[in-house]
Image (cartoon, grey):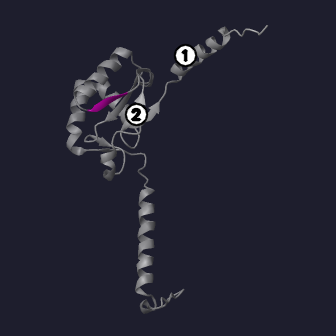
Amino acid sequence: MSEIVVTANPKAPNEISFEQRERDLNELERKRLKETRKSPFTNFYQVNKDSSNYLRSCLKENPRALELLLFIFDHMDKYNAVICSYKVFQEALGVGQATIARAVKYLKDNGFIYIYKSGTSNVYVANKDLVWNSWGTNLEYCEFPANIVLSKSEQEDQVKVRNKRIQTVQIKEKK
């Protein structure tokens, strides 16, 4: 077995062993990959150029649906999913429930989004062939976990109900 000699500050290329050079190159590659992942584009999502004609058709046929779709894109997680209520959509876009219902139906019927159920909640998943929010190698993981967007006004209703319940509870004393 040969002895490995490492020169702290080599002056000539032949002062570095092949093993040391390989370790140095591997370390440089790890650093390069780490820097690549610190992309300035972390707040971006990718739109498939082959599908941009679908976005244009959505703009022409149902502009509110496109507005809703962009809201979903802006709030989806790295796996294209988001959970939120119609109330969130209504408040964010400043429209009524019927407008949201028509927009969601349009997006679903035309393959822009998929809708899954989680209890009584809807999980909205953007079509990964249209838009993607992560590394291209993660496409197989599309659809979960999901970001959940809550509406403050919905929460206030829950607090009122909780407070009302607390106020009406009576405790009987033991005799």
Decide if residue 7 is on the left or right side of residue 105. Answer: right
Residue 125 image position (x, y, % from top left)? 33, 34
Using the image, determine if residue 110 lies above or below residue 29. Answer: above
Crowding near the residue tagged with mark 2, few <14, some 14–19, many ≥20 C-alpha atoms within 10 Å: many
Q: Position of residue 140 (x, y in %)?
A: 30, 47
In the picture of the structure, the residue carrying the numbered disc 2 is 82
| Quarter of image, res 51 | top left
Q: At numbered mark 1, what does the secondary structure look like: helix, strand or loop?
A: helix
Q: Quadrant of the C terminus?
A: top right
Number of labels in the image equals: 2
Badge 2 marks a residue whose secondary structure is strand
Instruction: Give the quadrant of residue 66.
Output: top left
Locate the N terminus by quadrant: bottom left
**Whole-Å distance between the Cαs marked 2 and 1?**
22 Å
| Marking on residue 42 | none
Q: Name the residue beneath numbered marker 1.
A: 157
| Vertical arrangement, residue 140 with respect to residue 172, above or below | below
Closer to the N terminus: mark 2 or mark 1?
A: 2
Q: Which quadrant of the figure has residue 71?
A: top left
Q: Does the magenta stretch mainly form a helix, a strand or a loop?
A: strand
The residue segment tinted magenta is: 112-117
On whether residue 114 falls in the magenta region, the answer is yes
For image coordinates 28% across by 41% down, the residue present is 128
**Given the current orientation, which residue lies at the most extreme right position?**
175
Q: Amino acid at mark 2?
A: Val
Q: Three-letter amino acid code at disc 1? A: Asp
Residue visible at 22% across and 29% down in the picture: 110
In the rendering, at what x and y percent does residue 22 appear? 40, 79
Expressed as whole percent of the image width and height from the top left, the position of residue 123 reads: 37, 30
Disc 1 residue crowd, few under 14, some 14–19, many 20+, Cα 10 Å: few
